[in-house]
Every structure is written in C-alpha cells, then in structure tokens.
Image (cartoon, rainbow, N blue to C red):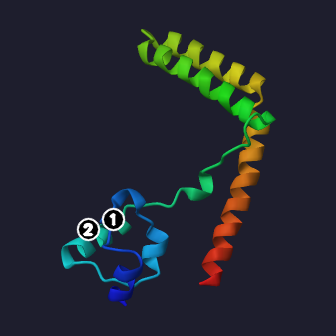
C-alpha cells in the first residue's frame, strides 16, 4: 500500500542519504515506466558479487597478509606499466609472484575460498527461504 509506505517511511528517496532498499522492498511500489525500463535493462548486465566480498577481522593473520600483498601489488603495478621491454616486465612480474607467495598467498587464497563458500551457502539459504 503506497500511502502506508509514505506515511511510515516518507517520500520515496526524498532523503537519498537515508535510502534503505530493504525497507523500500517491503512495499511493492511500481516504478514509472521509464524507470522500469532502465531497471529491466540493467538486470541483463548486473552480477551479484557479494559472495566474493571477503573482509578479514582487523589485525588477523589473514588481514595482515592481505594488506601486505595489496601494498606489494600497489608498488609493483606502476613498475609493470612503465616497463620498457617485455623482458623487464617479465622479471618484475616474476619477482612480484615470488614475493607474494612468500607473504602467504596460498593460505590467504584458501581462507578466501573457505569464506566464499560460506557466503555462497548463506545466499543459497536466503534464496531457498523465499
């Protein structure tokens, strides 16, 4: 009931910084045709990446490894982009891979995969509830 929605929540997106799509989804308000067309078009090109959003607890072993590898990549990428020869590029990339592996890349990937599987199963459970 749109009037119930407006009475409880207020105008749709009047205060965009308080926008809460979860609350809005409880009220089935049909969008204007022009907005509906954009939403339907976007459905063909959007992908849910939430299972891949892995956040490690602050200062955990995995967070430290992850930060070190990201820092290493941040330092390496500009050098790769500015490499004057393919040989220089290959040397830089191989050096990065070696250092990344020494930092614990394999155990980090195993933990990310484990957490990804947990996220994926939670999403499957939610999908099955509907």
Q: Give SS at disc 2.
A: helix
17, above or below 99, in the image: below
Which of these two is toward me, 65 or 5? 5
Which of these two is toward me, 32 or 82? 32
Residue 27 located left or right of residue 93: left
1, above or below 13, in the image: below
Task: Tell me the residue at 47%/17% (across/down).
Answer: 78
Residue 27, image x, y percentages: 42, 83
107, above or below 119, in the image: above
Residue 18, image x, y percentages: 41, 60
Residue 105 located left or right of residue 17: right
Numbered circle sitting on residue 104: none
Whether tag 1 and tag 2 are in contact, CB under 8 A, the answer is yes
Residue 80, image x, y percentages: 49, 17
Numbered circle sitting on residue 38: 2
**Would you identify the image quadrant in which residue 120 lies?**
bottom right
Task: Tell me the residue at 60%/50% (across/down).
Answer: 53
Task: Tell me the residue at 73%/53% (across/down).
Answer: 115
Residue 105 located left or right of residue 25: right
Question: What residue is pinned by disc 1?
Answer: 42
Q: Quadrant of the N terminus?
A: bottom left
Which of these two is toward me, 9 or 118? 9
């Amino acid at each position: 009931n749109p009037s119930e929605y407006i009475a409880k929540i207020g105008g749709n997106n009047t205060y965009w910084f308080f926008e809460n799509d979860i609350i809005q989804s409880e009220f089935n308000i049909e969008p204007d045709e022009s907005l509906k067309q954009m939403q339907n078009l976007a459905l063909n090109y959007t992908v849910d990446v939430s299972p891949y959003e892995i956040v490690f607890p602050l200062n955990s072993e995995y967070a430290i490894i992850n930060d070190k590898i990201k820092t290493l990549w941040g330092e390496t990428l500009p050098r790769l982009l500015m490499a004057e020869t393919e040989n220089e590029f290959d040397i830089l990339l191989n050096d990065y891979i070696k250092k990344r592996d020494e930092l614990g890349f394999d155990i980090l990937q195993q933990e990310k995969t484990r957490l990804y599987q947990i996220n994926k199963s939670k999403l499957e459970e939610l999908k099955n509830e509907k």
